[in-house]
Image (spheres, helix red, strand yellow):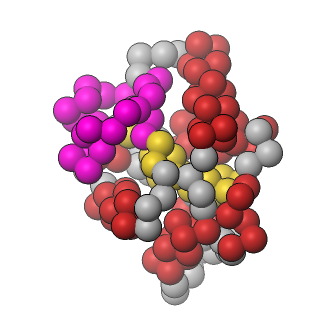
């Protein structure tokens, strides 16, 4: 899905580490259940020559940026660049720690941000908290 300005009121960008696809899918599905399109890198056409432009367009078009934090996400240069670009564009950023200690999961750029956490939650408790977080993001953006 190419992000356009008409998608703005109903689109959230999700940043995550490639090592965490199941959690990203759970958040994406929860946003869809709330009637909000969730853009992820999986929306980039395979083999796209302009994938960086597609990421930038998605951030430009969204009105909320959900960042799923974990040690691999903290170490991802692309997650960091997506956060930096969102901050420069004055986008609302909603950090969620999905696992790992704070010091190993949260990048400096978000170290003072208020954030939610599903770290340590499993099964139905985890899904219930994901749905609560998503509902709160939808309301706040």
- How many numbered tags mark residues here? 0
Residue 141 lies in the magenta stretch: no
User: Which residue is depicted at the point 54% across and 70% down?
Assistant: 60
Quadrant in the picture for the N terminus: bottom right
Q: Within the image, what quadrant is residue 34 found in?
A: top right
Give percent across and percent down for residue 107. Answer: 25, 45
User: Which residue is depicted at the point 49% across and 51% down?
Assistant: 92
Task: Point out the stretch of residues depicted in magenta.
Answer: 95-118
User: Which residue is depicted at the point 45% across and 28% down?
Assistant: 116
In the rendered image, the vertical position of residue 24 relative to residue 90, given as above or below: above
Relative to the observer, which residue lies in front, 89 or 73?
89
Give percent across and percent down for residue 6. Answer: 75, 71
Residue 99 lies in the magenta stretch: yes
| Residue 125 visible, this angle | yes
Q: Within the image, what quadrant is residue 84 found in?
A: bottom left
Q: Within the image, what quadrant is residue 45 found in?
A: bottom right
In the rendered image, the vertical position of residue 24 relative to residue 38, given as above or below: above
Relative to the observer, which residue lies in front, 76 or 8?
8
Give percent across and percent down for residue 139. Answer: 66, 38
| Residue 22 visible, this angle | no
In the displayed orientation, state which residue is furthest to the bottom: 49
User: In the displayed structure, does residue 115 sit left or right of residue 53?
Assistant: left
User: Which residue is depicted at the point 26% across and 26% down?
Assistant: 101
Give percent across and percent down for residue 47. Answer: 56, 79
User: In the displayed structure, does residue 49 sit left or right of residue 124?
Assistant: left
In the rendered image, the vertical position of residue 106 relative to residue 9, given as above or below: above
């Amino acid at each position: 899905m190419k992000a356009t300005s008409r998608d703005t009121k109903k689109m959230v960008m999700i940043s995550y580490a490639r090592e965490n696809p199941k959690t990203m899918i759970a958040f994406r599905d929860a946003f869809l259940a709330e009637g909000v399109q969730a853009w992820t890198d999986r929306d980039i056409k395979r083999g796209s020559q302009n994938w960086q432009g597609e990421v930038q367009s998605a951030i430009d078009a969204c009105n909320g940026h959900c960042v799923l934090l974990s040690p691999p996400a903290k170490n991802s240069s692309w997650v960091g660049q997506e956060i930096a670009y969102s901050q420069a564009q004055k986008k609302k950023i909603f950090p969620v720690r999905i696992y790992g200690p704070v010091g190993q999961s949260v990048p400096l750029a978000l170290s003072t941000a208020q954030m939610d956490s599903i770290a340590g939650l499993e099964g139905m408790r985890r899904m219930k908290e994901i749905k609560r977080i998503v509902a709160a993001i939808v309301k706040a953006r």
